[in-house]
Image (tube, rainbow, N blue to C red):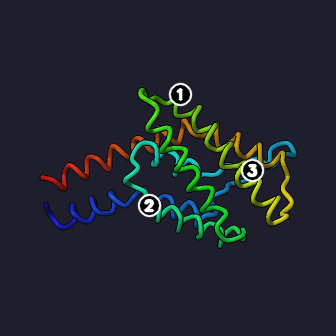
Amino acid sequence: MSIPNKFYSSILSIFPLLILIVSILLSSKYNFTYSGHNLSFNISYLLIFYWSLKKPNYLGLGFIFLAGILNDVIQDNPLGISSIEYLSLCIITGFARSRIILQNLFYDWVFFLISILIAGSINYIILVYIFNVPIIYNSLLLGLFATFLLYPLLAKILSWIDNIVQLSGNDKKK
């Protein structure tokens, strides 16, 4: 294998990590205002759920914890809130991976809704009851719903990326 191919395949093998870091550095909550309502979606939820469900070896729990700390620093949240959310999402996803026999997009999508509702509830409970941070409930629920609606599109894109990473992994073995 030539040097450019080795470099290309090594970049592709850490590509899920790079996508997560870039989404966090670019402020992983993307906001849009539509007819007076603030609509946001959380890309990091989508990435962590997808990679934890499909290929858990791509993102380790330590890396997800550090990504949560980085997100808290960037978002100016109390330190550790995002890490707890992300790790709870990984725990729920691990449970789903062990229980679901037939994985398809619809089942993943429904379980993603359940997972982000639980993670959002954990976020809400910690921020409101421990840190007394005021939260706009409509904005929180709209953001979770928008993230839920975005999952099928991003799952198809990430599946395509995973296929490319798998092909580069096969090239490494040759």
Residue denoted by label 2: 17
Is disc 1 in contact with disc 3, using a CB cutoff of under 8 Å?
Answer: no
Task: Give the crowd class for mark 2: few <14, some 14-19, many >=20 residues within 10 Å.
Answer: many
In which quadrant of the rendered view does residue 118 lie? top right
**Distance (Cα) linking label 3 and label 2:** 26 Å
Q: Residue 155, percent across and down?
A: 49, 40
Q: Mark 1 to mark 3: distance in Å?
A: 26 Å
Per the rendering, the mark at residue 140 is none
Looking at the rendered image, the disc whose residue lies closer to the viewer, 3 or 2, is 2
| Residue drawn at x 46%, y 31% as measured from the top left | 100
Label 1 or label 3, whichever lies nearer to me, is: 1
Query: Could you say where residue 97 lies in the image, as x and y percent from the top left?
Result: 45, 39
Dot 1 falls on a residue whose secondary structure is: helix
Residue type beneath disc 3: Phe
Please give the label number shown on residue 32. 3
Residue with the mark numbered 1: 106
Q: The disc labelled 2 sits on which kind of residue?
A: Leu
Residue situated in front as seen by the camera: 172 or 78: 78
Residue 132 is situated, as x and y percent measured from the top left of the image, at 85, 64
Image vertical order of residue 169 relative to residue 76, above or below = above
The reply, left or right, for residue 83 in relation to residue 15 is right
Q: Label 3's element?
A: strand
